[in-house]
Image: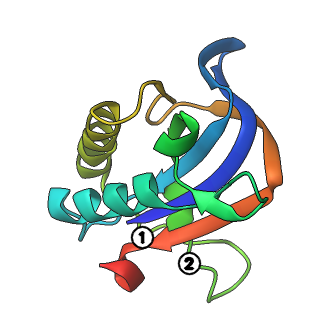
Amino acid sequence: MRFLIQRVQNARVTVENETIGSISNGLLVFVGVSNNDTREIADKMIHKLLNLRIFSDENGKTNLSLSSVNGELLIISQFTLYADCKHGNRPSFTDAGKPELANALYEYIIEKCKESVTKVACGEFGADMKVSLLNDGPFTIMLDSDVIC
């Protein structure tokens, strides 16, 4: 499982010119699922995500977590996080999770995050989404379950 996390001042996702999710100060999280992922792996990734200390404290140090700043989450499914570009110039996505598994884990992640975060917005699995954001920093982190789990 991979989470591409961007600290944002605001972000929104639209489908067919309609905004379906938006947040202000918080984290935009792109979620990629592989066929080997499970709820147990998702739980570890969620724990790491929610406890990352990547918001500035009163001294300007990145020392605060999402909950410390009453931050919001926008969670977007993104199978392209599993792009394999080793051969040729056209990415392969064979490592990305099958849609049924990926969608189930994506929905699970959203529901688990809602247990801890006041506002959790999300995209639409499998849709052609347009995401706009104001990256704060910029500050972008990749979490990969192969490394942290």
| Lateral position of residue 54 relative to residue 34, left or right | right
Amino acid at the residue labelled 2: Asp
The number of discs equals 2
Residue 70 position within the rendered picture, expressed as x and y whole percent measured from the top left? 53, 33
- Residues 90 and 55: in front is 55
Q: Residue furthest bottom?
A: 86
Q: Is residue 94 above or below residue 105?
A: below
**Crowding at mark 1 (Cα within 10 Å: few <14, some 14-19, many 20+):** few
| Lateral position of residue 10 relative to residue 129, left or right | right
| Lateral position of residue 84 relative to residue 42, left or right | right
- Residues 16 and 49: in front is 49
Q: Is residue 116 above or below residue 54?
A: above
Q: Which residue is mark 2?
A: 84
Residue 33 position within the rendered picture, expressed as x and y whole percent measured from the top left? 37, 59
> What quarter of the picture does the C terminus occupy?
bottom left
| Lateral position of residue 146 relative to residue 86, left or right | left
Q: Which residue is mark 1?
A: 94
- Residues 50 and 97: in front is 50
- Residues 116 and 138: in front is 116
Secondary structure beneath dot 2 equals loop
The mark nearer the N terminus, 2 or 1, is 2
Q: Is residue 99 above or below residue 107?
A: below
Amino acid at the residue labelled 1: Thr
